[in-house]
Image (cartoon, rainbow, N blue to C red):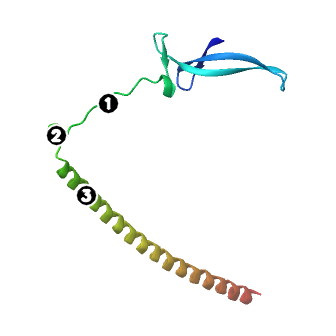
Amino acid sequence: MAIVHHYDARVNTTYVYESKGYYDREAHKTKTHRKLIGKLDENGNIVPTGKVGRPPKKVIASTSNDDVDNGIDYKTLYESYLKESKLKEERIDSLKAELAQERKARRSCESVLRKMLEMGGAYRSIYEETEA
């Protein structure tokens, strides 16, 4: 059993593994099992990682008076978000209406252009007949 250090350049971190070597008879070669122990901090100490070695999270107990203590008026905040949301929905609706008008105008322009091209084709055929 050996301790192996592996540097990962993507995250600029050195990981520490416990490595055990063994011989695989089917593949006829030696292989290793590696188990992550942790990672090295800037002082060279091993910091455990994973579910088993991870340090416990600090739990902050909340009380029912937290809203009052924070000085945040959640009702006003909620109402301002509601008002902002309503304004954005109105803007979306107006943009959708504008888009529909632009599409209608584009369709009418395309139909006029098609008619002009058809007329131009008919003009060319008349012009070619008179010259021939």
N-term mark: 2 or 1: 1
Give, as a three-letter code, the residue at label 2. Answer: Asn
Where residue 38 is drawn, which disc sits there?
none
- Disc 2 vs disc 1: Cβ atoms closer than 8 Å? no
Where residue 82 is drawn, which disc sits there?
3
Q: Residue at x 15, y 37 (%)?
A: 69
Give, as a three-letter code, the residue at label 3. Answer: Leu
Tell me where residue 89 appears, x and y as whole percent: 32, 63
Tell me where residue 120 appears, x and y as whole percent: 62, 82
> In the rendered image of this protein, does residue 13 appear above or below residue 2?
below
N-term mark: 3 or 2: 2
Where residue 59 is drawn, which disc sits there?
1
Q: Nearer the viewer, mark 1 or mark 3?
A: 1
Q: Nearer the viewer, residue 118 or 53?
A: 53
Q: Which residue is mark 2?
A: 65
Quarter-of-image position of residue 23: top right
Query: How crowded is the residue under tag 3: few (<14 C-alpha within 10 Å), some, or many (20+)?
Result: few
Query: How crowded is the residue under tag 1: few (<14 C-alpha within 10 Å), some, or many (20+)?
Result: few
For the C terminus, which image quadrant? Answer: bottom right
> In the rendered image of this protein, does residue 75 appear above or below residue 45?
below
Q: Nearer the viewer, residue 67 or 127?
A: 67
Cα–Cα span, label 2 and label 1? 18 Å
> In the rendered image of this protein, does residue 66 appear above or below residue 30?
below
Quarter-of-image position of residue 67: top left
N-term mark: 1 or 3: 1
For the N terminus, which image quadrant? Answer: top right
**Disc 1 element:** loop
Query: How crowded is the residue under tag 2: few (<14 C-alpha within 10 Å), some, or many (20+)?
Result: few
Give, as a three-letter code, the residue at label 1. Answer: Val
Q: Nearer the viewer, residue 129 or 34?
A: 34
**Disc 2 element:** loop
Cα–Cα span, label 1 and label 3? 32 Å
